[in-house]
Amino acid sequence: MKLYDYRSAPSPRKVRLFIAEKGLDVPTVDVDLRARAQQEPAFLAKNASATVPVLELDDGTCLTESLAICHYLEQQRPEPNLMGLGAREQAYVLMWNDILTLEGYLPLQESLRNGHEAFKGRALPGPVAWEQIPALAERGQRRAAIFFDKLETRLGESEFVAGQRFTYADIVAFVYLGFAPRATGTNPVDGRPALKQWSEAVAARPAIQRAG
Ligand SMILES: N[C@@H](CCC(=O)N[C@@H](CS)C(=O)NCC(=O)O)C(=O)O
């Protein structure tokens, strides 16, 4: 089994942190996104969407999408449980994964990719060369601020994102929070005390410190 990765990209970071929390040892292969290695035929044969992460299994099966990859790893190594125990907790983890990704990550991505020189002609990940729409950068910033207010409210009433213990939902939120300064130029923890306290607690976890 190996993980196709890129150190500074948020999506594979979710999987790396998950692997670290599980105590698994999975070798990684760096796919240099800046050098467009994801567009090479050999990589497209593994993932036609031209994105990382990809988890390649020993029989050559390639799994894409961090949620699916982490779900697979959870089945392989159930302890410590990160995807939720029982119907209700599992539903909360999945529910928050969608909220975090659709209301948080997509606006951050919208902001970065439509507002930064480096993403000219690459406004969306994948094999199609989408042009930037500058108005989306500005809208992404506003949507991201609304999202982090929502997360602040949630963490003011719940110790962790999906409930009273650390789960995959915290990994997802922590990775998106770490991506936010690059995407928006501001740090969402400023003026959001519950978010700040939670993020310090997550950052202090030994596995998170190890995996970075
Ligand atoms: N839904 C996917 C998103 C994957 C994704 O968008 N990956 C980005 C890095 S964060 C990528 O590979 N981008 C390639 C590009 O920008 O061309 C997941 O969570 O795994």
Image (cartoon, rainbow, N blue to C red):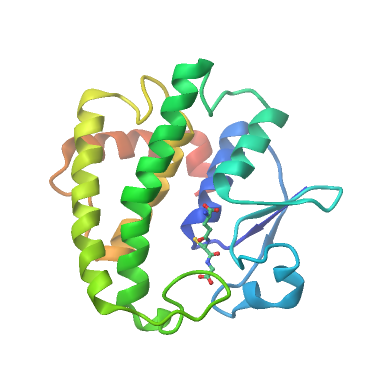
User: Can you tell which quarter of the image residue 21 is in?
Assistant: top right
Measured as percent of width and height from the top left, residue 17 is found at 53, 43
Q: Can the viewer see residue 189?
A: no
User: Can you tell which quarter of the image residue 96 is in?
Assistant: top left
Q: Residue furthest top?
A: 86
Q: Residue at x 53, y 28 (%)?
A: 82
Measured as percent of width and height from the top left, residue 169 is found at 43, 35
Image check: 211 left or right of 152?
right
Asked whether 211 or 189 is in front, the reply is: 189
User: Can you tell which quarter of the image residue 41 is in?
Assistant: bottom right
Image check: 160 left or right of 17?
left
Q: Residue at x 71, y 69 (%)?
A: 43
Q: Residue at x 25, y 31 (%)?
A: 155
Measured as percent of width and height from the top left, residue 35 is found at 59, 80
Measured as percent of width and height from the top left, residue 8 is found at 49, 63
Asked whether 162 or 94 is in front, the reply is: 94
Q: Is residue 160 above or below residue 128?
A: above
